[in-house]
């Protein structure tokens, strides 16, 4: 009886020890890659092993779709091709239980590229008495056809801070003007491209500050395929001379309205001898005064003529009356005789 109890105890103990040995540790074997790529591009797939036990090696087979991707190379321990790779890693001593291997492929056609474990994964622990349970995953990634490069090098907007764009922006209009005052040193230009893949550059021909007169800002837009479109903004800065001319013209106009003589403009030029000559511009009297004086003269002449004519008429009448009286008196004298 005692003997049977001992045998049963030994069997139970051995079973417990065996179960602990079979499931003492676990590991994960994972395939990783980018989520997507395009035809003609290379991509990497990594085999990552993470074990609770120190590892001395690993062995398995990987299947992949060779119609979509071509196997190019891999780290030592992985070889094959034409849809099947053998993983045979030996003689390593990774105490922390972490292994990582890289495989490189070339995408050939668009579609869903897959890679799977075609056989069980065998991991070899540093301690051969320890067995490891393994969990794996399959790989799937998307291969797309490359997008055709855009040829759109147009703009959808130009905004100017510090002035007004003339004419109003239109994608088909390439030349613009902006007028600014003499106190403006620079303007800010904002640009929006029609295609997100396009880029642009701003080139100014005036340096840090605007100069009086015309200044150019060139907007060079480059599309994905290299096509270019050039936009040009001419910034016209007002100068002080033009401002003084406006003020002088304004003063002259006001003086003419008030009947005053306008100011005489003077200009000076410096010759080779360093002398300065002043030239005075003749400004005629206001037209209104000449017309008034001439009208007054005409009125005076007409008045004199009227007076002379009136005097002649009156004198004629008086002569006629005198002649009539003389004839009447003479007739009366003859009658009396």
Image (cartoon, rainbow, N blue to C red):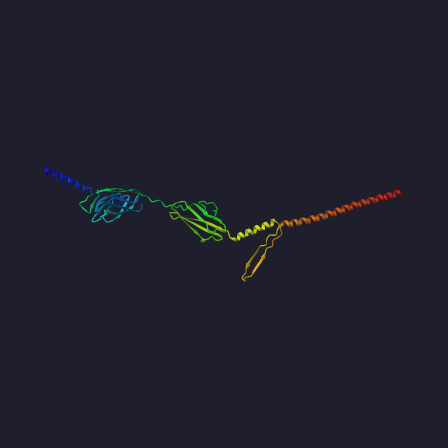
Who is closer to the viewer here, 231 or 67?
Answer: 231
Q: Position of residue 264 (x, y in %)?
A: 59, 54
Q: How many marks?
A: 0
Which residue is rendered at x = 86% and y = 43% of the image? 332
Furthest residue toward bottom:
273
Q: Position of residue 160 (x, y in %)?
A: 45, 47
Left or right of residue 266: residue 214:
left
Closer to the camera in the image, 46 or 82: 46
Residue furthest to the front in view is 2
Q: Position of residue 309 (x, y in %)?
A: 74, 47
Q: Residue at x 77, y 45 (%)?
A: 314
Tell which residue pokes out farthest to the top in this image: 1
- 228 horizontally vs 77: left or right: right
Nearer to the camera, 254 or 60: 254
Left or right side of 110 for 286? right
Image x and y of residue 33, in percent: 29, 45
The image quadrant of residue 32 is: top left
Q: The N terminus appears in which quarter of the rendering?
A: top left
Residue shown at 71% from the left, 47% from the top: 303
Q: Quadrant of the C terminus?
A: top right
Q: Residue at x 13, y 39 (%)?
A: 9
Q: Is residue 9 above or below residue 228?
A: above
Which quarter of the picture shows residue 26?
top left
Taking depth in this image into account, of 226 and 278 the one nearest to the observer is 278
């Amino acid at each position: 009886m005692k003997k049977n109890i001992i045998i049963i105890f030994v069997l139970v103990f051995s079973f417990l020890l065996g179960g602990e040995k079979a499931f003492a540790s676990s590991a994960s074997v994972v395939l990783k890659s980018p989520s997507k790529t395009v035809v003609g591009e290379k991509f990497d797939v990594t085999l990552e092993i993470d074990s609770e036990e120190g590892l001395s090696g690993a062995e398995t087979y990987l299947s992949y779709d060779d119609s979509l991707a071509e196997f190019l190379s891999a780290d030592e321990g992985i070889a094959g091709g034409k849809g099947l790779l053998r993983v045979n890693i030996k003689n390593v001593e990774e105490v922390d239980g972490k292994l990582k291997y890289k495989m490189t492929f070339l995408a050939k056609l668009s579609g869903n590229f897959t890679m799977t474990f075609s056989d069980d994964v065998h991991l070899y622990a540093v301690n051969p008495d320890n067995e490891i349970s393994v969990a794996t995953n399959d790989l799937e990634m998307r291969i797309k056809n490359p997008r055709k490069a855009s040829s759109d090098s147009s703009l959808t907007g130009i905004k100017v801070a510090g002035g007004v764009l003339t004419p109003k922006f239109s994608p088909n209009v390439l030349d613009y003007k902006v007028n600014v005052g003499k106190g403006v040193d620079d303007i800010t230009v904002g640009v929006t491209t029609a295609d997100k893949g396009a880029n642009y550059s701003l080139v100014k021909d005036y340096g840090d500050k605007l100069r009086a007169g015309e200044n150019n800002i060139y907007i060079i837009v480059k599309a994905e395929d290299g096509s270019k479109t050039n936009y040009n903004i001419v910034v016209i800065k007002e100068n002080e001379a033009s401002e003084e001319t406006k003020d002088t013209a304004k003063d002259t106009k006001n003086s003419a309205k008030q009947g005053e003589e306008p100011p005489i403009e003077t200009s000076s030029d410096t010759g080779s001898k360093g002398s300065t000559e002043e030239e005075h511009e003749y400004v005629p009297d206001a037209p209104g005064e000449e017309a008034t004086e001439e009208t007054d003269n005409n009125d005076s002449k007409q008045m004199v003529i009227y007076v002379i004519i009136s005097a002649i008429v009156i004198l004629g009448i008086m002569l006629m009356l005198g002649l009539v009286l003389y004839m009447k008196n003479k007739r009366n004298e003859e009658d009396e005789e």
